[in-house]
Amino acid sequence: MSRRVGITTRPNQRRVEWMREFPTLHDWMHFGPFVSREQALAWESLQRDCVRSGSGTELDDAAARWWGYRFDY
Protein backbone atom coordinates (compact mmCIF):
# COMPACT_ATOMS: atom_id res chain seq x y z
CA MET A 1 0.00 0.00 0.00
CA SER A 2 1.19 3.50 -0.81
CA ARG A 3 0.00 6.88 0.39
CA ARG A 4 -0.07 10.22 -1.43
CA VAL A 5 -0.58 13.70 -0.02
CA GLY A 6 -1.04 17.13 -1.56
CA ILE A 7 -2.82 20.46 -1.47
CA THR A 8 -5.47 21.89 -3.75
CA THR A 9 -8.16 24.54 -4.10
CA ARG A 10 -10.57 21.98 -5.52
CA PRO A 11 -10.54 18.78 -3.46
CA ASN A 12 -13.53 17.08 -5.11
CA GLN A 13 -12.20 17.56 -8.63
CA ARG A 14 -8.73 16.54 -7.54
CA ARG A 15 -10.10 13.28 -6.15
CA VAL A 16 -11.71 12.47 -9.50
CA GLU A 17 -8.42 13.23 -11.29
CA TRP A 18 -6.46 10.97 -8.94
CA MET A 19 -9.04 8.18 -9.33
CA ARG A 20 -8.26 8.12 -13.05
CA GLU A 21 -4.56 7.72 -12.34
CA PHE A 22 -4.93 5.35 -9.38
CA PRO A 23 -8.03 3.14 -9.84
CA THR A 24 -7.29 1.45 -6.51
CA LEU A 25 -7.56 4.78 -4.65
CA HIS A 26 -9.19 4.41 -1.23
CA ASP A 27 -9.41 6.18 2.13
CA TRP A 28 -9.54 9.67 0.57
CA MET A 29 -9.56 12.41 3.21
CA HIS A 30 -9.32 16.15 2.86
CA PHE A 31 -8.36 18.64 5.55
CA GLY A 32 -9.04 22.32 5.92
CA PRO A 33 -9.76 24.75 4.61
CA PHE A 34 -6.51 26.51 5.40
CA VAL A 35 -6.33 30.30 5.50
CA SER A 36 -3.50 30.43 2.95
CA ARG A 37 -1.45 28.35 0.54
CA GLU A 38 1.49 28.68 2.93
CA GLN A 39 -0.52 27.19 5.78
CA ALA A 40 -1.58 24.30 3.53
CA LEU A 41 2.05 23.75 2.51
CA ALA A 42 3.05 23.67 6.18
CA TRP A 43 0.41 20.98 6.80
CA GLU A 44 1.67 19.01 3.79
CA SER A 45 5.28 19.17 5.01
CA LEU A 46 4.23 17.54 8.31
CA GLN A 47 2.79 14.46 6.58
CA ARG A 48 5.04 11.42 6.88
CA ASP A 49 5.32 8.22 4.86
CA CYS A 50 3.60 9.85 1.88
CA VAL A 51 4.49 10.68 -1.70
CA ARG A 52 3.97 14.43 -2.11
CA SER A 53 1.97 15.57 -5.12
CA GLY A 54 3.67 18.76 -6.20
CA SER A 55 2.58 21.16 -3.47
CA GLY A 56 -0.39 22.77 -5.14
CA THR A 57 0.41 23.73 -8.69
CA GLU A 58 -2.84 25.65 -9.01
CA LEU A 59 -2.84 29.43 -9.29
CA ASP A 60 -2.59 31.13 -5.92
CA ASP A 61 -5.72 33.26 -6.05
CA ALA A 62 -5.96 35.32 -2.86
CA ALA A 63 -9.64 34.38 -2.59
CA ALA A 64 -8.97 30.64 -2.98
CA ARG A 65 -9.49 28.29 -0.08
CA TRP A 66 -6.73 25.72 0.16
CA TRP A 67 -7.27 22.14 1.29
CA GLY A 68 -4.93 19.27 2.11
CA TYR A 69 -5.71 15.76 0.94
CA ARG A 70 -4.40 12.29 1.57
CA PHE A 71 -5.25 8.92 0.10
CA ASP A 72 -4.01 5.35 -0.12
CA TYR A 73 -3.70 3.28 -3.26
Image: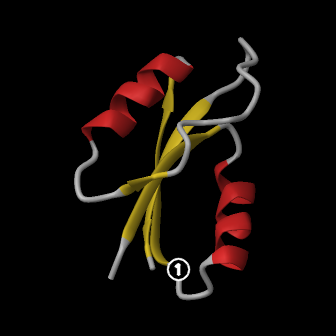
Residue located beneath label 1 in the image: 25
Left or right: 52 as drawn, with respect to 42: right
Colour scheme shown? secondary structure
Going 38% across and 38% down the picture, which residue do you hit? Answer: 44
Horizontal relation, residue 42 to residue 65: left or right: left
Q: Indicate left or right for 20 with 55 as reference.
A: right
Under circle 1, the secondary element is loop
Q: Position of residue 61 (x, y in %)?
A: 76, 17
Q: Position of residue 31 (x, y in %)?
A: 44, 45
Q: Residue at 53%, 50% (x, y): give it.
A: 53
- Where, by quadrant of the figure, is residue 59 drawn? top right
* Quarter the C terminus occupies: bottom left
Vertical relation: 21 (above or below) 48: below
Q: Residue at x 32, y 82 (%)?
A: 1
Q: Based on the displayed image, in which of its 4 quarters is residue 23 positioned?
A: bottom right
Q: Where 13 falls versus 72 (above or below)? A: above
How many discs appear? Answer: 1
Residue for point 73% across, 65% down: 17
Q: Amino acid at mark 1?
A: Leu
Q: Residue furthest bottom?
A: 24
Q: Residues within 10 Å of mark 1 (few under 14, many from 20)?
A: some
Q: Nearer the viewer, residue 35 or 42?
A: 42
Q: Position of residue 40 (x, y in %)?
A: 46, 29
Residue 26 screen position, x and y as percent: 47, 80
